């Protein structure tokens, strides 16, 4: 298992002031601008309602409660009138706040649905080289945790920040209108608050980036450990794996504690500044009342407005954490969406009505990593209906030839042609529909046996039964409790390696490709299953151009021609009999295989 845990987060992420990020974000918001605008409008009403309440309290105190000279009936009726207005404003604020939440939640869900769909579709079109460099845990984090962070920001922060900013400006304007001298004194605290907020923002951003990095490392490590649990148990690596997880968990714990320390300092500091502001209001405002320069109602309203003023600042820690986490997630999501690690596709790709099946490699060079060539100046031709076998030691380039033919990668030099046309000129989807690939590792889709054979195809029952028969799956299907409707894969029956191979042949036959590629299709199966696979191979190879990678002699001897690979180049070619008579590399490989086979039989008989 990798000591780096297969994951590394990019630095300098989550910049709140990044114009590029906000432009991309608003690109997803734009289709729902009417709903977002409605939420903003409702937030204006909510803000206006909250700012009106302290003013009503001031009017009640100055105009009625403290006006002893007014008749009792006038004071009582005036208070009743203001009380009804007060209740009405509260009701309006409640209704608009409720509607705002509903609108924001709906818009947020739609925006995140669109973003998740775009990201998943984009991932499916990326090159295999991209997935080789990015572990599954990292990509899963993008589609789950990062998208969820974006959702929380849309629903909890964007309109709320606008609402709070408007509220702060409105409070300052009202305070200046009520008593500009007292407001100027309170403004002394604003630069201090600004400095503290900026310092907190920088520290919080770094803390959240560290938390996200460590969380993603944990996700990647867990995914790696669970997928390789059999290897861990087989080689008794439980303690070592546990120790590594403890280290990762401890680092994540320390980063979260550091974040808590930052918030633990910031929130009390805001409370201290709020208390200082209240003390200034009471000191200066009380003196103004004694000197008859201010009414008690204005002082009461001042205190209420200052509580409203510091309320969003107190909540800034939570909102800022959401924003920073979401902006970091946005940076990584858009970085992934901007990844153009895709094979180039022609503007008008070629789609042939009929394919003969001629394959030609011309002077092909290819390397997965720079300065580590896998294939060098490779040239060969496969005629229509011909079966070509590829033989060679591990690392000789056999599977790379298949990857290039399927156009999972493009060659660095040279051309690969199909019916005389460069593969780059074909529609990739059409091309892969013409190439049937049976690999050693067969992916099982959680579902029924029928679902795994047909995948997205729709065929008649008679045709499906024939596919099952040709692929030698009849015995297996008859033994299943529900036949073709039996669930297999995750949450269902487990199939053996040989049964999966037969299933792979059924998939290929269902699509009836013009070219068939077998990559170690008979490896790691017992003799009885091998006989069934050989029969399935005969049915699959009939009337098709075929390329076969195999070590078993029975499969190789069926080929019309054999290419012997060594370090990315063809060193021998011919029929089985011709190559054996040359006593070269092919002869050496077959001799080794026969020795291993005989030794296996002797050991089995001895035991």
Image: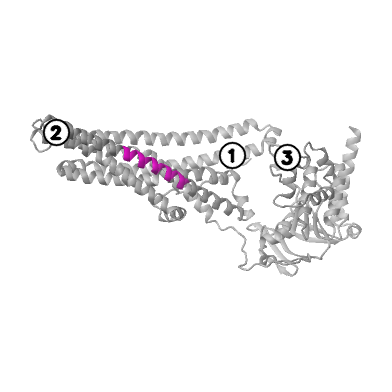
Q: Are marks 1 and 2 in contact (CB under 8 Å)?
A: no
Q: CA distance from mark 1 to mark 2?
A: 74 Å
Q: In front: 187, or 209?
A: 187
Q: In front: 125, or 201?
A: 125
- Residue extent of the magenta highlight: 91-108
* Label drawn at residue 605: none
Q: Residue at x 23, y 34 (%)?
A: 83
Residue topped by disc 1: 221
Can see residue 60?
yes
| Furthest residue in direction bottom, as rendered | 420
**Which tag, 2 or 3, sits closer to the chain's start?**
2
**Which tag, 1 or 2, sits closer to the chain's start?**
2
* Label drawn at residue 74: 2
Rate crowding at label 1 as few (under 14), some (14 to 19) or many (20 or more) other CA atoms within 10 Å.
many
Rate crowding at label 3 as few (under 14), some (14 to 19) or many (20 or more) other CA atoms within 10 Å.
many
Q: CA distance from mark 2 to mark 3?
A: 82 Å
Residue topped by disc 3: 488
Residue 534: percent from the left, percent from the top? 86, 49
């Amino acid at each position: 298992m990798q000591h780096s845990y297969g994951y590394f987060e990019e630095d300098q992420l989550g910049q709140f002031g990044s114009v590029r990020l906000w432009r991309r974000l608003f690109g997803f918001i734009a289709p729902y601008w009417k709903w977002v605008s409605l939420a903003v409008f409702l937030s204006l009403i909510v803000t206006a309602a909250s700012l009106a309440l302290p003013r009503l309290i001031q009017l009640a105190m100055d105009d009625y409660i403290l006006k002893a000279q007014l008749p009792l009936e006038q004071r009582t009726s005036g208070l009743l009138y203001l009380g009804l207005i007060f209740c009405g404003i509260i009701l309006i604020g409640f209704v608009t706040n409720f509607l705002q939440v509903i609108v924001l939640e709906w818009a947020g869900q739609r925006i995140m649905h669109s973003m998740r769909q775009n990201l998943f579709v984009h991932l499916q079109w990326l090159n295999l080289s991209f997935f080789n460099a990015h572990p599954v845990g990292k990509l899963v984090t993008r589609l789950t945790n990062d998208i969820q962070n974006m959702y929380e920001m849309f629903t909890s922060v964007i309109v709320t920040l606008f609402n709070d900013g408007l509220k702060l400006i409105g409070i300052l304007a009202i305070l200046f209108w009520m008593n500009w001298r007292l407001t100027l004194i309170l403004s002394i605290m604003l630069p201090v608050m600004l400095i503290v907020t900026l310092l907190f923002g920088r520290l919080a951003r770094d803390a959240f980036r560290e938390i996200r990095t460590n969380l993603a490392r944990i996700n990647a490590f867990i995914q790696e450990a669970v997928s390789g649990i059999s290897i861990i148990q087989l080689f008794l690596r439980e303690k070592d794996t546990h120790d590594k997880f403890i280290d990762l968990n401890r680092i994540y714990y320390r980063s979260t504690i550091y974040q808590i320390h930052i918030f633990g300092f910031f929130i009390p500091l805001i409370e201290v500044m709020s208390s200082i502001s209240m003390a200034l209001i009471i000191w200066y405002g009380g003196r103004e009342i004694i000197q008859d320069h201010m009414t008690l109602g204005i002082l009461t309203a001042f205190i209420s407005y200052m509580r409203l003023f510091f309320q969003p600042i107190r909540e800034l820690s939570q909102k800022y954490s959401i924003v920073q986490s979401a902006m970091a997630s946005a940076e990584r999501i858009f970085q992934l969406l901007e990844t153009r690690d895709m094979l180039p596709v022609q503007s008008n790709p070629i789609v042939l009505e009929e394919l003969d099946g001629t394959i030609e490699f011309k002077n092909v060079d290819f390397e997965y990593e720079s300065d580590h060539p896998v294939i060098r100046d490779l040239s060969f031709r496969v005629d229509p209906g011909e079966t070509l076998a590829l033989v060679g030691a591990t690392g000789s380039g056999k599977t790379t030839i298949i990857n290039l033919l399927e156009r999972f990668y493009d060659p660095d030099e040279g051309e690969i042609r199909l019916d005389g046309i460069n593969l780059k000129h074909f529609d990739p989807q059409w091309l892969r529909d013409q190439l049937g690939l049976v690999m050693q590792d067969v992916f099982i889709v959680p579902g029924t046996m029928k679902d795994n054979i047909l995948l997205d195809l729709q065929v008649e029952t008679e045709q499906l039964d024939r596919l099952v028969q040709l692929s030698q799956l009849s015995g297996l299907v008859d033994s299943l409790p529900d036949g073709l409707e039996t669930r297999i894969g995750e949450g269902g029956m487990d199939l053996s390696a040989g049964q999966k191979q037969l299933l792979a042949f059924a998939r290929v036959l269902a699509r009836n490709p013009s070219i068939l590629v077998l990559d170690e299709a008979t490896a790691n199966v017992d003799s009885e299953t091998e006989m069934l696979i050989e029969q399935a191979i005969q049915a699959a190879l009939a009337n098709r151009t075929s390329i076969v990678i195999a070590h078993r002699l029975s499969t190789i001897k069926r080929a019309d021609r054999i290419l012997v690979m060594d370090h990315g180049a063809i060193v021998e070619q011919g029929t089985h009999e011709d190559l054996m008579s040359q006593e070269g590399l092919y002869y050496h490989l077959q001799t080794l295989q026969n020795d291993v086979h005989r030794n296996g039989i002797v050991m089995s008989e001895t035991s």
